[in-house]
């Protein structure tokens, strides 16, 4: 075999190996003061946990695992020794490094290499503090050291501290694995975020909407959307939510029903069968004239092909909106709650304008972050 041929095969082998490595994620680290314990690597699914690998820890406590990376959406994993677990998330091909001690395995550890996993670690610590505080409160209550009212106040205060920290994570990046993880933390096997609570359901809605946009084919997304919609219905039945129960449907987007300039309520779902641009805006802003000129050009060009615009105004001045919207040919509706709009919260609207493209089945297919790409994205659906 010639030298060139040998080099060729070496190159191919290295190339194949590099491609193989690129399709995997790695998790490694150290469990100090561990000798002879078995460490398990497990994948945490929606309904079951799958064992992927295991290793017996020696006196140095070092471990190394490698597994196929997730293909379509972030996935959740954990390492476990007996009943002690550390959760982490993988988005693609991270190299996650976890350091802990055997006697403090799941209560005091660090995670490097994955921002979502690092945030999950901090949320886990906050959740543990929440549980410890509530447990102490329960003991006081059992001993009648505090009254019913004080017990409730202190418990609510502790839960609110967790929620405040978790909401920062959720609203900063609702598409992240950390945001999803934050929603489903539990104390005494009960969710800290109550999806039937009128305020908590907004956090569920923010994550559900983002996952529906970025990971539409993921089983977690379908479950999260349905779970959130059930919460909205339950919240409505308890008198705590502004969306009437018969107007809440699982459309792949959340139902909106608001009045137009004539006072007639118009549902977003009434446009099903058309390609819809859902636009959250405010007519009093500097960008509004330019945005509406762009939308007018698109509306004129594509209306005959089944294109429609459903524009939600979050203006504080209703009369200004009515005057501004009086000559606009597409659907313009008004939310009197303005910046406190529950619909905007459900769609995770953090700035204006925010635009979504919905297909003919009423499903969100794209969140438009750059108005210059709107025409090309619309053309893909027509």
Image: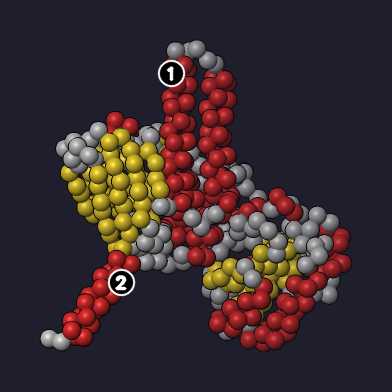
Question: Dividing the image into 4 quarters, which one contains the C terminus?
Answer: bottom right
Q: Where is residue 46, by image quadrant?
A: bottom left
Residue 59 in view (yes/no): yes
Q: Residue sitting at 30 percent across and 35 percent down?
A: 101
Q: Nearer the viewer, residue 268 or 218?
A: 218
Residue 219 in view (yes/no): no
Dot 1: few (<14), some (14–19), or many (≥20) neighbours within 10 Å? Answer: few
Q: Of label 2 and label 1, which has the lower sequence position?
A: 2
Label disc, if present, on residue 19 of the rendered structure: 2
Q: Residue sitting at 34 percent across and 45 percent down?
A: 98
Q: Position of residue 37 (x, y in %)?
A: 19, 38
Side of 80 relative to 294 (left or right): left
What secondary structure is found at the residue carrying circle 2? helix
Q: Position of residue 271 (x, y in %)?
A: 63, 73
What secondary structure is found at the residue carrying circle 1? helix
Q: How many marks?
A: 2
**Residue at mark 1:** 139
Q: Kindly give the residue lying farthest to the left in the view shown.
A: 1
Q: Nearer the viewer, residue 262 or 94?
A: 94
Q: Position of residue 75 (x, y in %)?
A: 38, 57
Q: Residue sitting at 64 percent across and 80 percent down?
A: 375
């Amino acid at each position: 075999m010639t030298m060139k041929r040998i080099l060729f095969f070496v190159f191919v082998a290295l190339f194949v190996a590099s491609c193989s490595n690129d399709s995997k994620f790695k998790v490694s680290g150290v469990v100090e003061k561990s000798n002879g314990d078995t460490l398990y690597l497990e994948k945490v699914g929606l309904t079951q946990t799958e064992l992927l690998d295991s290793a017996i820890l020696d006196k140095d406590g070092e471990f190394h695992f490698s597994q196929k990376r997730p293909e379509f959406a972030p996935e959740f994993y954990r390492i476990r020794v007996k009943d002690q677990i550390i959760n982490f998330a993988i988005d693609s091909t991270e190299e996650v490094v976890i350091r802990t001690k055997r006697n403090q395995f799941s209560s005091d550890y660090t995670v490097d290499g994955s921002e979502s996993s690092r945030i999950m670690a901090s949320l886990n610590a906050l959740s543990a503090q929440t549980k410890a505080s509530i447990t102490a409160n329960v003991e006081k209550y059992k001993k009648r050291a505090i009254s019913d009212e004080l017990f409730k106040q202190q418990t609510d205060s502790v839960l609110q501290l967790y929620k405040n920290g978790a909401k920062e994570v959720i609203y900063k990046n609702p598409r992240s694995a950390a945001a999803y993880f934050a929603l489903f933390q539990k104390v005494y096997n009960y969710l800290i975020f109550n999806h039937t609570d009128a305020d908590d359901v907004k956090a569920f809605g923010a994550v559900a909407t983002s996952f529906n946009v970025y990971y539409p084919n993921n089983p977690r997304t379908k479950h999260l959307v349905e779970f959130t919609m059930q919460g909205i219905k339950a919240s409505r039945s308890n008198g705590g939510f502004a969306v009437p129960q018969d107007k809440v449907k699982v459309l792949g987007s959340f139902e909106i029903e608001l009045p137009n300039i004539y006072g007639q309520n118009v549902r977003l779902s009434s446009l099903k069968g058309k390609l819809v641009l859902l636009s959250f805006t405010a007519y009093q802003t500097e960008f509004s004239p330019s945005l509406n000129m762009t939308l007018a050009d698109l509306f004129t060009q594509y209306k005959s092909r089944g294109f429609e615009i459903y524009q939600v105004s979050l203006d504080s001045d209703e009369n200004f909106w009515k005057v501004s919207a009086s000559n606009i040919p597409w659907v313009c509706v008004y939310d009197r709650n303005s910046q406190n709009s529950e619909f905007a919260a459900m769609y995770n609207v953090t700035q204006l304008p925010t635009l979504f493209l919905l297909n003919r089945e009423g499903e969100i297919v794209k969140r438009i972050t750059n108005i210059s790409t709107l025409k090309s994205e619309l053309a893909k659906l027509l």
